Image: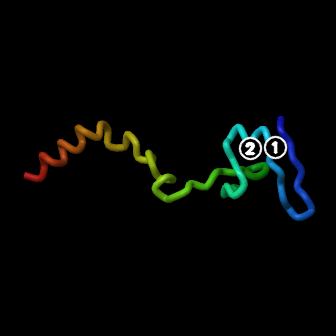
Amino acid sequence: MRTTVISGKGQVTIPAELLRELELAAGTRLHVVPVRDGVMLLRQPESAADALAGSTAGMYGDSQEYTETERGSWT
């Protein structure tokens, strides 16, 4: 288990091994999310498009089939 300590200024150091493993660097923005027994850090996407990419995958089944069905309903 990896551990760290909160400094007097409320800062937390992420272990170097974990920084390399997750490809985090100075300036990387993280969302701080409260969870039941602590906090969770999530990398902030660079853009809204990146954050939403793939979020509706499979919602309409096969996209090609869905597109053809929709186009067929236009006439």
Q: Is residue 74 above or below residue 68?
A: below
Q: Which structural element holds mark 1?
A: loop
Q: Which structural element holds mark 2?
A: helix
* Side of 27 relative to 60 (left or right): right
The spot of residue 16 in percent (x, y) is 80, 42
Front position in the image: 56 or 16: 16
Q: Residue at x 83, y 54 (%)?
A: 12
Q: Residue at x 13, y 49 (%)?
A: 73
Q: Residue at x 69, y 47 (%)?
A: 24
Q: Residue furthest right?
A: 8
Residue annotated with mark 2: 19
Residue 18 falls in image quadrant: top right
Residue type of the residue flagged with mark 2: Leu
The spot of residue 30 in percent (x, y) is 67, 55
The spot of residue 27 in percent (x, y) is 69, 58
Please tell me how crowded label 2 is: few (under 14), some (14-19), or many (20+) other residues with Cα within 10 Å: few
- Are dots 1 and 2 in contact, CB under 8 Å? yes
Mark seen at residue 15? 1
Q: Is residue 26 above or below residue 57?
A: below
Residue type of the residue flagged with mark 1: Pro
* Side of 1 relative to 66 (left or right): right
Front position in the image: 75 or 18: 18
Q: CA distance from mark 1 to mark 2?
A: 6 Å
